[in-house]
Amino acid sequence: MSTLSEQLHLQNQRRIAKFNDAHYEWLMQFESQFTHAITLTFNPQRIRHISNRLSNSQILTKIELLELQKKSVHCFANRLNKSLFGNTTARHGNKLLMVPVIEGLIDGAKVHYHCAIGIPQDRFEAIEVKVRDAWRHAPLSGDQVDVQPYRNRGWLGYMSKQAKYINRECVDWGNVLIPCTASEFPSIAE
């Protein structure tokens, strides 16, 4: 027979695994449409500049900073969408598939985003340049941008590794983009 502490620990581990599995399972429904894996970092100098612009009596809280970082990713997504699809996004609802995941919210780590995106194959040309340009225009954008072809579901597991607690952000749900035609994207496996 195990102690109460061991039972509670085991119960907590099962809950974490279930929560993480639910995130991973949700990501897997789009796995065949993901075409690229992206990592975006933030510029600490820009963050300090915004903090300094606030009056001396006001301090930028972690929650406020997180909201500013989310707005930067929103700006990035809008610019990338426009760059890839032009005005058809507004007229016809064509959008890229994008699932942004926030990492580094615990233990004082450097906050950054991992994104899985999906675009039609006819838009692959110059995707890295378009991603870098769109991110460069985001308010808190950093210099480290990594764009790789999506290879396998290992990226989705890596992205969702911090999905452990319901009260902690992981998937940036406000910036998830699911196109009307997501089911029409070509599968990488095909």
Image (cartoon, rainbow, N blue to C red):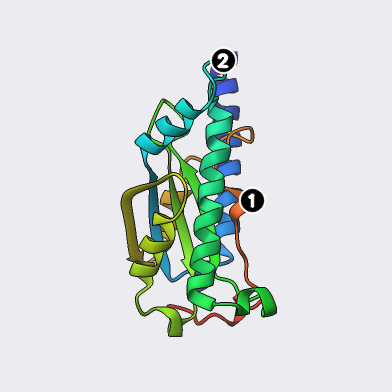
- Report the disc number at residue 2: none
Split into 4 quadrants, where in the image is the N terminus? top right
Determine whether, in the image, residue 41 is placed left or right of residue 162. left
Residue 3 in view (yes/no): no
Q: How many C-alpha atoms fall within 10 Å of the one at disc 1: few (<14), some, or many (≥20)?
A: few
Q: Earlier in the sequence, mark 1 or mark 2?
A: 2
Q: Are marks 1 and 2 in contact (CB under 8 Å)?
A: no
* Residue beneath disc 2: 57
* Mark closer to the observer (1, 2): 2
Task: Kindly report the distance in space between the C-alpha atoms of the residues bearing marks 1 and 2.
Answer: 30 Å
In the image, 30 versus 69, the foreground residue is: 69
Mark 1 residue element: helix
- SS for callout 2: loop
Residue at image point 42% right, 38% down:
111
Quadrant placement of the C terminus:
bottom left
Q: Is residue 44 left or right of residue 72?
A: left
Residue position marked by numbered label 1 in the rendering:
174
Task: Where is residue 32? Give x, y as percent.
Answer: 50, 73
Write the residue at 59% across / 54% down. 175
Q: Position of residue 141 (x, y in %)?
A: 41, 48
Observer-nearest of 128 and 100: 128
Give, as a three-letter code, the residue at label 2: Ser
User: Which residue is painted at 54% across and 58% down in the image?
Assistant: 99
Question: Dividing the picture into quarters, in which one does residue 7 lie?
Answer: top right
**Does 164 sit above or below residue 41?**
above
**Is 38 situated above or below 183?**
above
Q: Position of residue 25 (x, y in %)?
A: 58, 56
Give the amino acid at mark 1. Gly
Q: Residues within 10 Å of mark 2 (few under 14, many from 20)?
A: few
